[in-house]
Image (cartoon, helix red, strand yellow):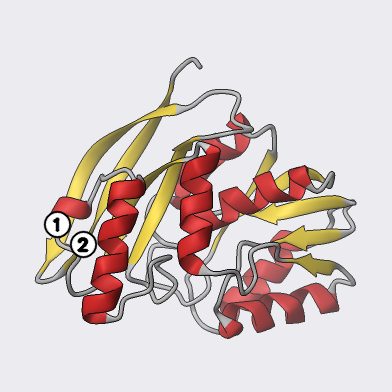
Amino acid sequence: MRLAALLSGGKDSTYSVYIARQYGWEVTNAVILITDVDSYMFQRPNTKEAVKIAESLGLKAHVKYTEGKEEEELEDLKEALSGFDVDGVLVGAVESDYQWARVQRVCHDLNLRTFAPLWRKDQEMLVRDMVSAGFKIMVVSVSAYGLGEEWLGRILDESAIDELVHLREKYGINVGGEGGEYETTVIDGPGFAYGFNAEIRERHWHRDSGWVELELIPNSK
């Protein structure tokens, strides 16, 4: 099975590449949609740095800029996925029916299959599995009650996950961030030829939400 991966550099899309390879599937390309606005479809923070992550994972990166407009971004996705010699598209979708249905629609039009190895998995279990497997996951945006500015730049570990579970019990947040509570960038993990030092170039904070701009600097294993 030869696949192109939709890659944002976040934990779910990156972990999906790892899982697909565990299945014995060949993941050859990374398709990266970059937007400067909030989007229901695509991650915004630090997706430009996903090119570096793709290279470390041994994937050929293909970048497409999108303005994030609801229908136009589907055409952008369709254009980005066109012309690959692959059997299907790998996505990191976990719980969003909106994202899943729209990716499915585009892939159907292109006669491509869609593979989502994380679909409907337990959120807490997934994040714990990622950390246990050795992924180094940095929180790069937060937008939920209980997640303050101190979370920006934090690496997810068992202690952080325990705190997220507590916040779920207290405020009802999603431990995996599927409700937009937080977003991440993966800076090292299994399958990486090399990891990264993540330098925070700028912090953005307004009222009760914010994000950080990163520069990923390759380091040696």
Of residues 163 and 147, the one nearer the viewer is: 163
Residue 79: quarter of image: bottom right
**Up-down relation of residue 54 to residue 123 (above or below):** above
Instruction: Look at label 1 and name its amino acid.
Output: Glu
Q: Position of residue 209 (x, y in %)?
A: 19, 67
Is any atom of residue 29 visible in this view? yes
Tag in front: 1 or 2: 1
Q: Position of residue 34 (x, y in %)?
A: 50, 57
Instruction: Look at label 2 and name its amino acid.
Output: Gly
- The residue positioned 30% from the left and 57% from the top of the image is 162
Among the two numbered marks 1 and 2 on one chain, the one whose residue lies closer to the N terminus: 1
Q: Residues within 10 Å of mark 1 (few under 14, many from 20)?
A: many
- The residue positioned 57% from the left and 75% from the top of the image is 73
**Up-down relation of residue 8 to residue 35 (above or below):** above
Q: Position of residue 39 (x, y in %)?
A: 44, 74
Residue 202: quarter of image: top left
For mark 1, what is the residue? 149
Residue lying furthest top: 220
24 to the left or right of 127: right
Contact (Cβ within 8 Å) of mark 1 with mark 2: yes
- The residue positioned 30% from the left and 74% from the top of the image is 168
Q: How many marks?
A: 2
Q: Disc 1 to disc 2, how far (Cα)?
A: 7 Å
For mark 2, what is the residue? 210
Label disc, if present, on residue 99 of the rendered structure: none
Q: SS for tag 1?
A: helix
Of residues 213 and 138, the one nearer the viewer is: 138
89 to the left or right of 72: right
Q: Position of residue 105 (x, y in %)?
A: 75, 82
Q: Residues within 10 Å of mark 2 (few under 14, many from 20)?
A: many
